[in-house]
């Protein structure tokens, strides 16, 4: 039997993986500037963490988790998202007892059992940030701006910030009541999922992709009209700070997000895209009750998760070429046994000087070695033959220009190093 890759997963092959490294390096550099530290939590956690954190009635917990029993009879789940694990760590390490805020970021795989399509996989990757210990609306705006800066740093254009406030445990029941009152007479026309959502999690109906449900909820009561004074003041301040920062946003009163922990600020980053799923390149919001829910003090939090696959897909659709150098600095072509012998020390010297260097290992003739240098997208090809060895020199050719020079062997490493820096 020939083995095949599991459905909804991909191999990131050389050639592609460099793009990931580039995107990740941009995320890390931005996080350094915004003074975030990296945290790495496990890829699996106790199932209950997600049931409690993400919410029992969410699609993620109801249908999408990779849950298994380990040999010690524990129920574990591959993380479907990053926030719950980070909060667990924040609580378990008692970081809430330290001076706040705490600003963390992560990059890594997440797992959801969804129907795979463009921009939707079962193993996908997120760049996420989480901030604990402040309710300050300037932080909400900065987090949103950080997301926008990330896309900009990659050259992605047309990213829209969709913004809403989903209120708090004080004002949400008011909206819930209005919504249920509005939808109950229309219950029979809702899709099956939404009919059961009406009792369990009516707000989620606003997020249903079913056309009829969308129509029916067109004039449904909006959360923003039900906000309590504190939530309204907070939301107004977030919008003001976004204006100050020059971040464009559109208010989307239907934005509810797929996870239950959100309070107040909720947002999504979207781009125009051919695939319907692929358009949401990131999302996040405030979760003021989550730390307490997971067993910590009453510490507020806010963050986002950006989908790396979807970001790369959007870049591809916009035909953005990332500035990635795939080539090797120097390819050493040798002629004769002595040159081949000496090449190992030259390669080592180049590598120790910080250059990438390669040679032939298959006893290819000169022509074959030159072809290999081309394939390796070498900046320089250095040719070492018997004549050069006698003269203690080496011929260095720059492939792009075709310029060729004979250089003293003891100058060679410096020459390549200086040239590669240009
Ligand atoms: P989320 O909206 O569930 O939020 O996911 C964030 C992003 O991950 C999505 O906008 C999308 O780009 C990407 N994504 C989600 N599912 C898939 C999938 N199956 N395939 C490919 N990409 C996907 C969260 O996960 C929250 N933890 C974000 C957050 C952090 N909120 C506060 N802090």
Image (cartoon, helix red, strand yellow):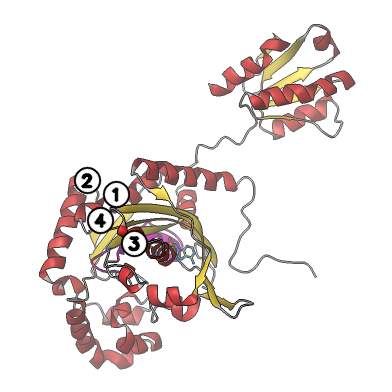
Residue located beneath label 3 in the image: 284
Mark 2 to mark 3 CA distance (whole Å): 18 Å
Q: Can you say whether 215 is above or below 189 in the image?
A: above
Answer left or right for 165 relative to 83.
left
Residue 107, which numbered label?
Answer: none
Which of 330 and 169 lies nearest the eye of the viewer? Answer: 169
Mark 3 to mark 4 CA distance (whole Å): 10 Å
Which of 143 and 204 lies nearest the eye of the viewer? Answer: 143
Of pointers 2 and 3, the one earlier in the residue sequence: 2
Q: Nearer the viewer, mark 4 or mark 1?
A: 4
Residue located beneath label 2 in the image: 245
**Segment tinted magenta in the rendering:** 262-287
Residue located beneath label 1 in the image: 145
> Number of callouts in the render?
4
Mark 4 to mark 2 CA distance (whole Å): 12 Å
Residue name at image x 49 percent, y 51 percent = 312
């Amino acid at each position: 039997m020939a083995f095949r890759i599991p459905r909804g997963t991909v191999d990131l092959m050389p050639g592609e993986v460099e793009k990931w490294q580039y995107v990740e390096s941009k995320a890390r550099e931005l996080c350094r500037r915004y003074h975030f530290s990296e945290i790495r939590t496990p890829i699996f956690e106790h199932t209950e963490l997600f049931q409690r954190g993400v919410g029992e009635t969410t699609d993620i917990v109801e249908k999408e988790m990779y849950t298994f029993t380990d040999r010690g009879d524990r129920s574990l789940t591959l993380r479907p998202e990053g926030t719950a694990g980070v909060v667990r760590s924040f609580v378990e390490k008692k970081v809430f007892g330290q001076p706040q805020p705490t600003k963390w970021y992560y990059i890594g795989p997440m797992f959801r059992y969804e129907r795979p399509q463009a921009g939707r996989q079962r193993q996908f990757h997120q760049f996420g940030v989480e901030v604990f210990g402040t309710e300050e609306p300037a932080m909400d705006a900065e987090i949103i701006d950080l997301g926008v800066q990330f896309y900009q740093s990659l050259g992605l254009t047309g990213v829209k910030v969709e913004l809403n406030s989903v209120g708090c445990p004080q004002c949400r029941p008011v909206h819930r009541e209005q919504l249920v009152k509005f939808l109950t007479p229309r219950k029979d026309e809702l899709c099956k999922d939404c009919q059961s959502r009406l009792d369990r999690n009516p707000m989620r109906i606003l997020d249903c992709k079913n056309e009829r449900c969308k129509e029916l909820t067109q004039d449904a009561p909006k959360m923003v009209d039900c906000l309590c004074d504190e939530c309204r003041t907070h939301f107004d301040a977030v919008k003001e700070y976004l204006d100050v920062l020059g971040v464009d946003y559109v208010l989307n009163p239907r934005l509810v997000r797929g996870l239950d922990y959100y309070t107040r600020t909720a947002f999504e980053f979207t781009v125009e895209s051919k695939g319907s799923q692929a358009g949401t390149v990131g999302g996040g919001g405030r979760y003021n009750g989550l730390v307490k829910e997971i067993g910590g003090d009453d510490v507020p939090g806010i963050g986002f998760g950006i989908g790396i696959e979807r970001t790369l897909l959007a870049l591809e659709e916009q035909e953005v070429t990332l500035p990635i150098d795939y080539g090797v600095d120097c390819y050493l072509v040798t002629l004769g046994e002595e040159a081949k012998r000496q090449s190992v020390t030259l390669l080592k010297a180049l590598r120790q000087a910080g250059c990438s260097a390669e040679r032939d290992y298959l006893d290819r003739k000169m022509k074959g070695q030159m072809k290999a240098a081309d394939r390796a997208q070498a900046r320089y090809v250095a040719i070492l033959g018997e004549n050069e060895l006698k003269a203690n020199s080496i011929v260095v050719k720059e492939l792009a220009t075709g310029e060729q020079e004979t250089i003293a062997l003891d100058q060679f490493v410096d020459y390549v190093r200086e040239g590669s820096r240009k």
